[in-house]
């Protein structure tokens, strides 16, 4: 049996190595938290009126993918769009990017219930028709820029046939598809319970 005896110097070097690795990991984690904080600040800076809207909060009562509500899905897409824009340096107008992302699925009905919900006009073709419904609702409740309208109307491309006409809409389309896949396969877990709208309003 071989016994390895470490000198005081070796032990000190080993401790310093572990300490150095810990400091590197801690520094990386701090940068991640700082980036996350900046994303949340951007989200609230540009979308404050939407996030405080009682109509927008109704999206907490509708399921999007898996157990994810439409509300949380829209938040995920907005955050992911900000990250993509900054990572790829696409130079999007962040106000339009954020607001369009938050409202891209503002259709306000349960698309899983065939014909039972009055807003679900084409229950079998939700993917094709809900962008127009979302745009109609968003136009009614908020003042939209041309870019925001393009984001909402074209985010389901290629189902919308006509492709996005601005970089903001392309980024949200990409963010939406990424988040949808992650939610559908359970890789993004829901953090908000589905809200019973009728109970909430009573």
Image: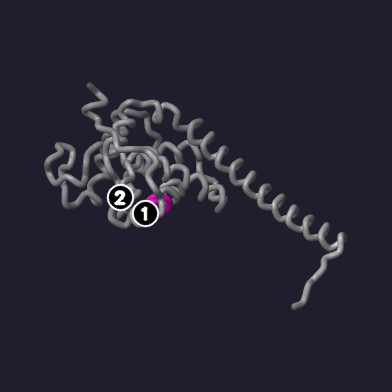
Q: Could you say which is closer to the camera, residue 116 or residue 92?
A: 116
* Image marks 2 and 1: residues in contact by CB distance under 8 Å: yes
Would you call the spot at circle 2 few (<14 residues within 10 Å), some (14-19), or many (20 or more)? some
Q: Could you say which is closer to the camera, residue 97 or residue 102?
A: 102
**Residue 184 occupies quadrant:** bottom left
Label the magenta part by its dominant secondary structure: helix
- Residue at 16% x, 52% y: name it: 124
Q: Could you say which is closer to the camera, residue 62 or residue 106?
A: 62
Would you call the spot at circle 1 few (<14 residues within 10 Å), some (14-19), or many (20 or more)? some
- Residue at 16% x, 45% y: name it: 113
Instruction: Examine the rendered structure and indicate whether residue 100 appears above or below residue 22.
Output: above
Question: What percent of the width, then of the height, locates residue 37?
Answer: 56, 38
Question: What percent of the width, then of the height, locates residue 80?
Answer: 47, 47
Residue 30 at least partly seen: yes
First along the sequence among labels 2 and 1: 2
Q: CA distance from mark 2 to mark 1?
A: 7 Å
Q: Which residues are magenta?
A: 174-182
Question: What percent of the width, then of the height, locates residue 156?
Answer: 32, 51
- The residue carrying mark 2 is 66
Question: What percent of the width, then of the height, locates residue 180?
Answer: 36, 52
Q: How is the image coloured?
A: one colour
Q: Which image quarter holds the C terminus?
A: top left
Does residue 93 appear left or right of residue 6 in this picture? Answer: left
- The residue carrying mark 1 is 186
**Label ID, residue 26:** none
Instruction: Examine the rendered structure and indicate whether residue 13 appears above or below residue 110.
Output: below
Asked if the stretch drawn in magenta spans residue 69, the answer is no
Residue 147 at least partly seen: no
């Amino acid at each position: 049996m071989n016994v390895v005896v470490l000198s005081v110097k070796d032990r000190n070097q080993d401790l310093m190595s572990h300490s150095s690795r810990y400091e590197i990991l801690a520094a990386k984690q701090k940068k991640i938290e700082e980036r996350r904080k900046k994303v949340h600040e951007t989200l609230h800076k540009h979308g404050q009126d939407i996030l405080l809207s009682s109509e927008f909060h109704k999206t907490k009562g509708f399921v999007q993918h898996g157990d994810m509500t439409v509300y949380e899905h829209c938040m995920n897409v907005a955050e992911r769009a900000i990250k993509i824009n900054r990572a790829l340096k696409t130079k999007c107008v962040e106000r339009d990017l954020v607001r369009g992302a938050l409202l891209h699925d503002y259709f306000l009905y349960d698309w899983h219930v065939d014909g039972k919900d009055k807003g679900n006009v084409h229950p079998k073709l939700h993917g094709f028709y809900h962008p127009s419904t979302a745009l109609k609702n968003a136009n009614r409740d908020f003042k939209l820029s041309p870019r925001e309208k393009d984001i909402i109307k074209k985010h389901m491309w290629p189902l919308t046939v006509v492709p996005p006409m601005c970089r903001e809409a392309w980024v949200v389309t990409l963010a939406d598809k990424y988040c949808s896949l992650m939610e559908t396969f359970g890789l993004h877990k829901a953090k908000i319970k589905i809200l019973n709208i009728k109970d909430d309003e009573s």
